Image (spheres, grey):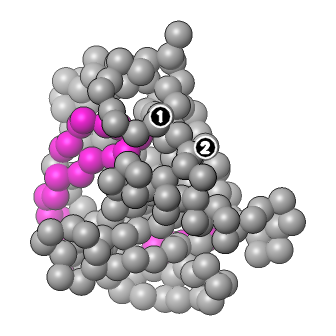
Amino acid sequence: MIYPIVAYGDPVLKKVAQNIQKDDPGLDLPKLIQDMYETMYEASGVGLAAPQIGLGIRLFIVDTDRMEDSETGIKKVFINAQILAEEGEKWAFQEGCLSIPNIREDVYRKPKIRLKYFDENWQEHEETYEGVAARVIQHEYDHIEGKLFIDHLSSLKKTLLKSKLSNISKGNVKVDYRMKFPAQK
Ligand code: NI
């Protein structure tokens, strides 16, 4: 099942997401993960976080295999992730977001991260990532912390994007995947 992707302006994107309980009877995790992959591929994304389909839970998926300049592509499910450390000199990388279509901006983040998380089989991992894989994880991790990549921009940049962002919330945007717009009349 393909979910509509929640657009900028929806309060779910600003909330810190809750940990998932392993034995939550109301949550069909395998089905949800499969649906999230379908939803992400339909929108040609390389990452998708549960808040982007309206669910305030600490779950995101990443698939950087198809990114051109990624030699170390990863395809992974991250449950209840916690970033433990971020290291190195911040570097610029142009980010976009399925919830904020048609806007791409350079974002500065540290190149190396260490995080722990559970995979889809509830195996716990503690791993280090660098480069593009780290970047996509940081972006998705922000989503479960209630943050968006535009929150990292200067106040001048944000001011310049204000009307575009307001148009996105209203659904005045060209996008080729299904979205849910919070301020659509
Ligand atoms: Ni995003």
Indicate whether residue 82 is drawn in magenta.
yes
Closer to us: 65 or 16: 65
Q: Secondary structure at mark 1?
A: strand
Report whether 89 appears left or right of 52: left
State whether label 1 is within 8 Å of ligand 1: no
Residue 69 pos. (x, y %):
13, 72
The span shown in magenta is: 80-105
Task: Name the residue tied to disc 1.
Answer: 179
Above/below status of 158 relative to 66: above
Q: Give residue 4's mark.
A: none
Residue type at tag 1: Met
User: Which badge, 1 or 2, comes first in the chain's sequence?
Assistant: 2
Residue 136 pos. (x, y %):
32, 65
* Label 2 packing within 10 angstroms: few (<14), some (14-19), many (20+): some
Q: In terms of image quadrants, where is residue 91?
A: bottom left
Q: Would you say residue 151 is visible in this rendering?
A: no
Task: Name the residue tied to disc 2.
Answer: 54
* Residue located 25% across and 69% down the image: 66
Residue type at tag 2: Gly
**CA–CA distance in space, label 1 to label 2:** 11 Å
* Residue located 18% across and 44% down the image: 105
Determine contact: label 1, label 2, CB under 8 Å: no
